[in-house]
Image: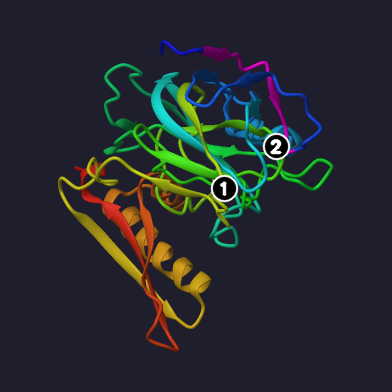
Amino acid sequence: MACNHTIHKNAHHFGWDNSIEPILTVTPGETIEVETIDSSGGQFNQTSTVADLGNLSFDKVNPVTGPIYVEGAEPGDAVAITFLDFKPSGWGWTANIPGFGLLTDQFPDPALHIWKYDSVAMKPALYGPGGAVPLKPFVGTIGLAVAEPGLHSVVPPRRVGGNLDIRDNTVGTTLYLPVEVAGGLLSLGDTHAAQGDGEICGTAIESPMDVAIKVDLIKGANFAFPRFETDGPVTRHFDTMGYQVTTGIGEDLMQAARDAVSGMVDWVSSRTGMSALDAYMLCSVCGDLRISEIVDMPNWTVSFYFPKNVLG
């Protein structure tokens, strides 16, 4: 990860605030190695247990490293971030946090799974009886400062980025973020070793790692929301054996999504013998929610894709 600059993980903050002094100033075209902390803010480690969930402070979740001042960035421009490389730590965690997630009413009990994986070979990470999840490191939270003064939560995504949880923000992808303040003030964190589209239980394989990025500037872009482009197929590592797919159909997209996921949780649980809660967390790190149809009123179709190669 030979970059023009390095930012250490101690240079982090919680929430977006345009009054935070930048830790680094870069010229468009330069590269940066960014160290990150896991999304618990260091509250979990490789020996943590479910009992530690009860002490989790949400004031310390999703720390982001930065901010980085991009020379020449002005409101109306876009900062372009190309993801060059990831240096994973070899461990991570997935949790069911009561009150958080798509099926929180069905799964009120806390659960925590600690993952260990080969940070060099990046072989599929083992999960329970027979599960093996292919890994695809990416940045979950990356964004610029908002124009409105004060401290703003890092939990919801925003038009300037933030907690996007787009699993295709990985090596080769270029992400474009709308600028609202001078210099943009770029920060990133919440790195994941793997996640399905939707992150249905609210957590992925939350894993600290170093990220190498290149920063560029698009003058006068005037983007309303973030955009990104990839350098190739986005699901190539999950496609080898096909998918099991469940659907939800109805007038409410959120309920259809819940029904599709519930159906897959039932299938994974019956197929493997693992508890429904464990199946729910497994679906969060490797299964994909898709809107299959949104035009045939009054009902819409949502599908949940579970890769067969996870269970062999």
**Where is residue 74, by image quadrant?**
top right
Q: Which residue is mark 2?
A: 54
Would residue 94 appear left or right of 155 to someone viewing this image?
Answer: left
Q: Which residue is mark 1?
A: 220
Q: Residue at x 49, y 83 (%)?
A: 251
Write the start and end of the magenta stretch as one range.
Answer: 5-16
Q: Nearer the viewer, residue 274 or 281?
A: 281
Residue type for callout 2 = Gly
Local packing at callout 1 (Cα closer than 10 Å; few below 14, some 14-19, many 20+) is some
Against 114, residue 223 (above or below) is below
Q: Position of residue 66 (x, y in %)?
A: 65, 25
Mark 1 element type: loop
Q: Nearer the viewer, residue 15 or 26?
A: 26
Mark 2 element type: helix
Would residue 70 appear left or right of 200 to someone viewing this image?
Answer: right
Local packing at callout 2 (Cα closer than 10 Å; few below 14, some 14-19, many 20+) is few
Q: Earlier in the sequence, mark 1 or mark 2?
A: 2
Q: Residue at x 54, y 60 (%)?
A: 103
Magenta stretch: residue 52 in it? no
- Work out which residue is located at the far left of the displayed protein and give it: 241
Against 261, residue 184 (above or below) is above
Residue type for callout 1 = Gly
Would residue 108 appear left or right of 293 to someone viewing this image?
Answer: right
Q: Position of residue 300 (x, y in %)?
A: 41, 79
Q: Position of residue 312 (x, y in %)?
A: 19, 42
**Where is residue 232, by image quadrant?**
top left
Against 285, residue 2 (above or below) is above
Q: Nearer the viewer, residue 106 or 197?
A: 197
Q: Residue at x 46, y 25 (%)?
A: 213
Q: CA distance from mark 1 to mark 2?
A: 47 Å
Against 184, residue 307 (above or below) is below
Q: Position of residue 235 (x, y in %)?
A: 27, 46
